[in-house]
Amino acid sequence: MLQAYLGGILLLLLGAGIGLFLVYAPTFLAPRRPTPQKMIPYESGMDPVGSVRQRFSVHYYKVAMIFTIFDVELALMYPWITFFPENSAWAFVIFLSFTAVLAVGYIYLLRIGVFDWSRRSL
């Protein structure tokens, strides 16, 4: 009975072994020469400037949330189209109506100025 699962178990053990080796190999093999320059935080290739507790505008987070919402909805459209291959006309009508709702929401957000970074009020 175990022979039926032997190939899968060996493959699982091999994958776990390679994964553990790749995670822990740099700890043992990489040279360690820490310097003060190497120990500073890395911020996209630039030297850190300012306080760690710097405040960001709320507009940044609002735009990030709106982008995430539209991005997730767009990602859900691809499986939707492939799910309805036998009745593609109906799927296309639903797709257009869903896209129209998204477009109305986007136009509303543009009109109220959510994407205007220069305004001060929320």
Image (tube, rainbow, N blue to C red):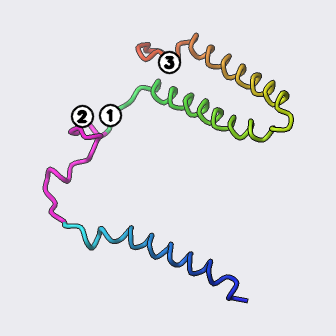
The answer to whether marks 2 and 3 mark residues whose Cβ atoms lie closer than 8 Å is no
Q: In the image, 69: left or right of 94? A: left
Q: In the image, 47: left or right of 112? A: left
Q: Residue at x 67, y 82 (%)?
A: 5
- Front tag of 1 and 3: 3
Which residue position holds label 3? 115
The part of the chain drawn in magenta is 32-52
**In terms of depth relative to the viewer, which is nearer, 97 or 122?**
97
Indicate the quadrant where residue 82 lies: top right
What type is the residue that disc 3 sits on? Phe
By secondary structure, the bulk of the magenta-drawn segment is best described as: loop
The answer to whether marks 1 and 3 mark residues whose Cβ atoms lie closer than 8 Å is no
- Front tag of 2 and 3: 3
Task: Mark 3: give few (<14), some (14-19) or many (20+) Cα within 10 Å.
Answer: some
The answer to whether marks 2 and 1 mark residues whose Cβ atoms lie closer than 8 Å is yes
State the mark number for residue 50. 2
Indicate the quadrant where residue 27 lies: bottom left
Q: Which of disc 3 and disc 1 is earlier in sequence?
A: 1
Q: Residue at x 56, y 75 (%)?
A: 12
Which residue position holds label 1? 54
What type is the residue that disc 2 sits on? Gly
Q: Secondary structure at mark 1?
A: loop
Q: Residue at x 32, y 71 (%)?
A: 25
Q: Residue at x 62, y 80 (%)?
A: 7
In the rendered image, residue 122, in percent from the top left (x then y), is placed at 51, 18
In the rendered image, residue 11, in percent from the top left (x then y), is placed at 56, 76
Q: CA distance from mark 1 to mark 3?
A: 22 Å
In the rendered image, residue 87, in percent from the top left (x then y), is placed at 86, 34
